[in-house]
């Protein structure tokens, strides 16, 4: 699959800054809201 202007993260790369709106109208900013060194991020796109 061709990727244009996209950087794939390698081991040890810093997590890119991302902002997400969540269900309770709050905002999560990653990686600022990560609790510690080891975290899991799951994207659930729906059941379809």
Image (spheres, rainbow, N blue to C red):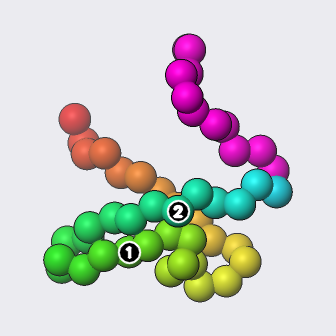
Q: Where the N terminus falls, by quadrant? A: top right
Residue nearest the viewer, comparing 31 with 22 = 31
Q: Single out the residue that lies furthest toward the right.
A: 12
Cβ–Cβ below 8 Å for labels 1 and 2?
A: no
Q: Which residue is mark 2?
A: 17
45 versus 32 height, above or below: above
**Where residue 38 sits in the image (x, y, percent)?**
70, 74
| Residue occupied by mark 1 | 28
Q: For mark 2, give the secondary structure.
A: loop
Q: Which mark is residue 44?
A: none
Alpha carbon separation for disc pair 1 and 2: 11 Å
Magenta residues, as a range?
A: 1-11
| Residue 7 is a magenta residue | yes
Taking the image as shown, residue 33 lies to the left or right of residue 25, namely right
Q: Quadrant of residue 14?
A: bottom right
Q: Residue at x 57, y 32 (%)?
A: 6
Q: Residue at x 22, y 35 (%)?
A: 48
């Amino acid at each position: 699959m061709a990727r244009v202007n996209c950087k794939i993260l390698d081991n040890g790369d810093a997590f890119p800054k991302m902002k997400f709106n969540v269900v309770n109208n709050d905002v999560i900013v990653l990686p600022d809201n990560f609790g510690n060194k080891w975290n899991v991020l799951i994207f659930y796109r729906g059941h379809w």
